[in-house]
Image (spheres, rainbow, N blue to C red):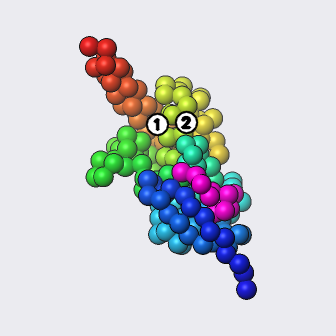
Amino acid sequence: MSSKVPIRLSVNGRVRELDVEPRLLLVHLLRDQLGLTGTHVGCDTSNCGACTVHLDGEAVKSCTVLAVQADGTKVTTIEGLAHGDELHPLQEAFWEDHALQCGYCTPGMIMAAADLLARNPDPSEEEIRHGLEGNLCRCTGYHNIVKAVQDAAEVMHGSAVADRQEVSV
C-alpha cells in the first residue's frame, strides 16, 4: 500500500487538488490523471525534451519533476498556450512554416521556444538553436523549426512594439 500526498497546483489556469503517490512524475500526472496528452513521454531520461512544460513560467522537462514538487506552482502545458480557438504565435508559426513532421517533439519544442522568447524576444539563429538544444527532433533537420521561432518572435515582438506605441499615444 502506498500513501498518497495531497497537492494543489494551477494547471493552464485551473486550480487542481489531487492526492498523488510521492513517486509520481509530473508528466504522468498531466497525461494520465488530468488527460493533458499534448505533453509527450519520449525518453524518460530528460534527453529528448518532448515532455517540456512551464513550471512557474520556466521551461522544465516534466519527466524530471515529481508531482509533489509541483505543489503550489503554476503549470502551463501546450494546451494552455492557445487562447480559446486562437493559436499562440508559436503554434501558428510551426503550422505555417511546416516545422513538424511526425509532431512528437512539437509540443516540447514550442514550450522551450516560448520560454526562450519570454527571456529573449529577438533571438539570433544561433541563440534559437542554443535555446532548443535540449529538445530533439528526429524528423525535420531543425531548419523549419528555427524559422518558425524567428517568425513567431517577429509577430510577438511586433505586437509588443504596437502595444507600446498605443500606450504612448
Give the x, y percent position of residue 128. 56, 33
Give the x, y percent position of residue 168. 31, 14
- The residue closer to the viewer here, 134 or 70, is 70
Q: Is residue 124 magenta?
A: no
For label 2, the residue is 116
- The residue closer to the viewer here, 84 or 107, is 84
Graded by Cα atoms within 10 Å as few (under 14), some (14 to 19) or many (20 or more), the crowding at tag 1 reads many
Q: Is residue 136 left or right of residue 103?
A: right
Mark-to-mark CA distance, 2 and 1: 9 Å
> In the image, what residue occupies the spot 28% across and 52% down?
85
Give the x, y percent position of residue 41. 59, 64
| 166 up-or-down from 25: above or below | above
Residue pushed farthest top?
169
> In the image, what residue occupies the spot 60% across and 37% down?
131
Give the x, y percent position of residue 55. 58, 49
Q: Tell me if label 2 and label 1 are in contact, CB under 8 Å.
A: yes
Q: Quadrant of residue 162?
A: top left
Q: Secondary structure at mark 1?
A: helix
What's the amino acid at mark 1?
Val
Q: Which residues are magenta?
A: 63-74
Q: Is residue 64 magenta?
A: yes
What's the amino acid at mark 2?
Leu
**Quadrant location, the N terminus:** bottom right
Q: Secondary structure at mark 2?
A: helix
> In the image, what residue occupies the spot 53% across and 66% down?
17
Image disc number at residue 149: 1
| 32 up-or-down from 166: above or below | below
Say if residue 103 shows up in the picture.
Answer: no
**Quadrant location, the C terminus:** top left
Q: Is residue 43 left or right of residue 120?
A: right
> In the image, what residue occupies the spot 60% across and 64% down?
7
